[in-house]
Image (cartoon, rainbow, N blue to C red):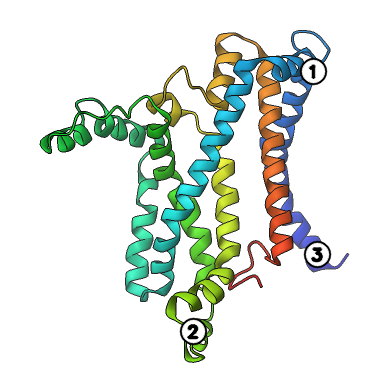
Amino acid sequence: MSTKQSRTAVLAWPALLLVALGFIVPVAIILVMSVTDPEPGTQNFEWLATNSTAHDILWRTIYIAVLATLITAVLAYPFAYLMATSSTLVRSILMVVVLLPFWTSMMVRAFAWIIILQKNGLLNTVVGAFGIDPLTILGTNTAVLIGMCQILMPFMVLPMVSVMVGIDSRLPLAARIMGAPKWKAFLQVYFPLSLPGVFAGSLIVFILSLGFYVTPALLGSPRQQLIPNALFTQVLELLSWGRGGALAVATLVMVGAVFLLLFLVAKVMGIKIGKIGGGL
C-alpha cells in the first residue's frame, strides 16, 4: 500500500468508527433482542407475521412514505428546475429558501402546522370567510403528509439541483433547432438526464419518511400509528424490546427492498444514480 493510500485509510478510520458505533452496533443489538427478548425464539417475528394491528402499521407506514415521496418529487422538480436554470443570484436566493426550514426544529414546524390546521386555525378561518364548512385535517394522515412533505422538500430538491446544473443546456437547444417542440425537447432530452437526481432524492426521502416520529405524533391520530410511534409504544410504554426489535428489523428490510428495487429499475433504464449531468 502506498503512502497516499495509507494516509487515506488513516483519515477514514474516524468515519468508519462513527458508522460502527452509530449504526452497526445498534443494529446488531436490535437483531439480538428481537430473537432473545423476552426469551430466545422467533415469537416476536411470529407476532409481527400474524398480528393484524402490526400489519396495518407496516402497510400504513409504507403507504405514507410512498405518498410523501411522490408528492415531494412532484413539488420539488419544478423548483429544482427553476434553481438550475436561473442566474447565480436567483439560484442563491432560492437556495436560502430551501435551507430556511433547517433554521427551526422539526417540533416547532409541527406546532406551526397545528396552529394552521386546527379546527379554529388559520386555514379554517380563511375558508370560513368564503362560507365553506370547517375542514377536518388535523389528526388525519393528510395532516401528517403535509407536515412530512414540508420537512422533506430540501432532501428532494438538493439532489435534483446537483444533477440538473450539470446538464448541458445546449442539448435541449439542439433538439429544438432540429424541430422538436419545447415540451418534447424537455421530455425526451432534459428529463431523462435529470432522472439520477430524481432517483437519489426519492431514495433519501423514502428512507427518511420511514423514521418520522414527532410529525405523526403531533399531527396524526393515535389510532393511525406509524412504525416509529409503534416502536415507542412497544419499547418505552409496554417495555417489549423484542417486538420493538422485530418492527425495527422489518423497517430495515423495507429500506433494503426499496434500495434494491430502485437500483434494479435504474439499471434497466440505464441510469447511474448520483451521476452529475445525466444518466443515459
Out of 113 and 29, give the one closest to the viewer: 113
Give residue 211's position: percent from left, percent from top.
Answer: 55, 34
N-term mark: 2 or 1: 1
Cβ atoms at labels 2 and 1 below 8 Å apart: no
Give residue 30's position: percent from left, percent from top.
Answer: 72, 24
Neighbor class of circle 3 (other Cα within 10 Å; few <14, some 14-19, many 20+) is: few
Distance from the alpha carbon under mark 2 to that under mark 1: 60 Å
- Front of the two marks 3 and 2: 2
Q: Secondary structure at mark 3?
A: helix
Residue at 52% x, 85% y: name it.
175
Neighbor class of circle 2 (other Cα within 10 Å; few <14, some 14-19, many 20+) is: some
Which residue reaches farthest bottom? Answer: 177
Instruction: Give the amino acid at mark 3.
Output: Gln
Q: Secondary structure at mark 2?
A: loop
Quickly name the residue at label 1. Answer: 35
Distance from the alpha carbon under mark 3 to that under mark 2: 50 Å
Quickly name the residue at label 2. Answer: 180
- Front of the two marks 2 and 1: 2
**Which quadrant, please, contains the N terminus?**
bottom right
Task: Describe residue 38's horizontal placement relative to residue 136 as left or right.
Answer: right
Q: Secondary structure at mark 1?
A: loop
Residue 5 is tagged as 3
The vertical placement of 198 against 24, above or below, is: below
Q: Can the viewer see residue 100?
A: yes
